[in-house]
Image (spheres, rainbow, N blue to C red):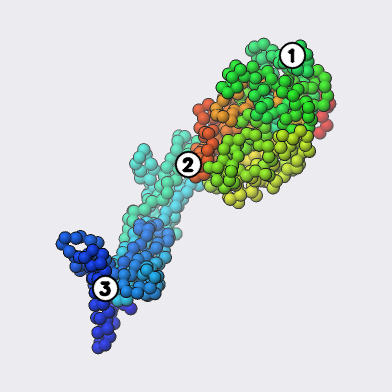
Amino acid sequence: MSPIGSASVPVGRKTGLGVVVTAMRRWLILMWTVLVAAGAGGGAALASANHQGKSTLASPEHQFKPIVPLTIVARPNPSTAGARVTVAGRLSAPSPVGATVVLWERPTGANSFRRIATTSTDASGRYRFARVAESQRSWYVTSRGLRSRIVTEQVRAKISLASSDQYPVPGDHVRLIGQVVPSHAGDRVMLQRREGSAWKVVATERLNAGSRFVFQRTLGQPTRFAFRAVLAATAGNLWSHSPPLLLSVSEIHKIKHMVVIMQENRSFDQYFGTFRGATGIPGLAGNPGSEPCIPDPSQTGRCDKPFHDRSDENFGGPHLSHSATVDMNCSNPARDRGCHMNGFAIEASRGGHCTGTNPLCSPCKVVAKSICPDVMGYHTGADIPNYWRYARDYVLQDHMFEPARSWSVPAHLFLVSEWAAKCRSAYKPSSCRSYLGYNDRPAKSQYAWTDITYLLHRSRISWAYYLYKGIEPDCDSNTQVTCQPVRQGPKTPSIWNPLPSFTDVGQDHQKHDVRSLNAFLAAARAGALPAVSWVIPDAAVSEHPPSLVSRGQTYVTGLINAIMQSREWRSTAIFLAWDDWGGFYDQVVPPRVDRNGYGLRVPAMVISPYARRGFIDDQTLSFDAYNKFIEDDFLNGQRLNPATDGRPDSRPDVRESNPRLGDLARDFNFKQRPRPPAILPVCPATDLRPKPSC
């Protein structure tokens, strides 16, 4: 049926009986509407069905909203080109169900409406159309001889804007590229930059035949820029702009690949306690203070002093939350006050009732002075020459603390998420509460809170967690007295491989990014390293007692050599650390930043072509600093913050924002020329005994 009273669409002639029927139909609808209006309040407004829709019958005493027999609305309005628009309304008439509703459309520039769709009303007289508007247009509907008002859909053009370099450094020339939809070929598009609260036009370009544009910009001093592309209003669209493009211009973006190599169970003083210039063992290697001598229950009336331990096989002591408390021996443990840092031998002797790799135990089986327990033993540059060479040539961090006072499970959870918790529901981050015990292996746990890969995936930043296939030394449960080592692999959740147990990793379909070590070596050779990599050992090369120190050093050297021999060495930063102290002596009291940590001090280094040479970084650091570096380099400073990441949980703080946490960017000199690789022998000469065989 043609729209009644439409000047744009001809109305067919009707004579005789047809005219009478049409007139009677209109009269009946009009009378029904009057009755409805009267029932709604006696004197309510009445809308006529003429094409102007303005005639009303209203009581001067009561200003009720007119009842319109056929309504129409479009939502959203305005809309963005290409977005779905719902055109809907209601037919108010006797027996409205099943009435045919016709949608008429007039695009911008057209002289008349045309019929484009039909539908039927439901039991309440409602109807709905789904449309896609590329440009501004008008609609109305007709049904049973009625015509609605005209609604005009206002449309904004869809404009994209991207940078040729997502991570520019000062002085970079970048291309800001985009497209306008629908086509506005030949029109001008403006580039605006935000200055304070206002936007300023900084360039204009004409759209090419494909409605695309390119702006060339040189980005100067380190700062954060916000750009957007703007199209002026035309007959077909409203004034339109792209989403803001945020660019952080920083020297840190010279690092395109970040690799975290995580080893196991060594304290800073055990590996670098006699490294000159570092905060090492008092009374040794020129360090201030008196040489410590700590109580040892196995040596009645005597105490244990630090000694040079040339043994390739070390044992350490228990390293759970309770162990950290005993080792620190504080007069006020709740506030970490009056800490003597002298309980290491006591705790090691308590762990002597069991053997093996359980974190409750001291795995040493030989009872002899200065051999078991060996928690006061330390190594020198003659024992671990490659590690000391890296420390001399690059950056040694002498205040890197384990993020939590506990063992491997919490340490690796903090490494990737800055929290350790237990959750009542695997799918509700808000159900999680802080927890450092972890008696269960990760295969039995599901981590509902957010890890750093969630932010990386959302920003389309590549990552991979590389795992050496083999065994992990710690038990399934930290309450077992004896246990057999557990096998680990990329697909198996384990103590050192927590990511497969994170709910968000599964929901993001990212489990395939947990890969084997062979995949890392292949990526390094091919120059295809992801932006962020974690590299995790197996027990044999982990340096986790009683695994050999020499085997771990050989393995780590091989990894670093592979990166240095890659074409991506010039844009890579390697962060090498050990996950917890392993029960070995360390003399620095860890700072308390929240209820979970920090834990005791561990060795850590930075190796990069931009790393400062021979620099000892004394900032307070923990593994949270690695995530902070990731966020500053690849995520425009976004934090793992439950208030902003869309997955609220009850973590006690945002670790990266803690004012005590240092900034790893301090370990780099981005003004220097990239340093060439320094390939080291994987089997260096060493004083370790027995002599290692590679």
SS under mark 2: loop
Name the quadrant containing residue 271: top right
Give me the residue at 29% from left, 72% from top.
147
Q: Position of residue 183 (x, y in %)?
A: 41, 60
* Kind of residue sitting beneath label 1: Cys
Please state if 207 lies on the left or on the right of 10 as rendered. Answer: right
Mark 3 highlights which residue? 32
Label drawn at residue 507: none
Q: Earlier in the sequence, mark 1 or mark 3?
A: 3
Tell me if residue 86 comes above or below residue 607 in the rendering: below
* Kind of residue sitting beneath label 2: Thr
For discs 1 and 2, the disc positioned in front in the rendered view: 1
Label drawn at residue 644: 2
Instruction: Work out how far the residue at label 1 is from the one at label 3, CA to CA, in angstroms.
Output: 104 Å
Name the quadrant containing residue 556: top right
Q: Identify the residue at the far left of this view.
A: 60
Q: Quadrant of the N terminus?
A: bottom left
- Evaluate whether residue 685 shows in this view: no
The answer to whether the residue labelled 3 contacts the one labelled 2, judged by CB atoms less than 8 Å apart, is no
Mark 1 highlights which residue? 303
For discs 3 and 2, the disc positioned in front in the rendered view: 3
Give me the residue at 37% from left, 39% from top.
195
* Kind of residue sitting beneath label 3: Trp
Q: Position of residue 492 (x, y in %)?
A: 70, 46
Q: Earlier in the sequence, mark 1 or mark 2?
A: 1
SS under mark 3: helix
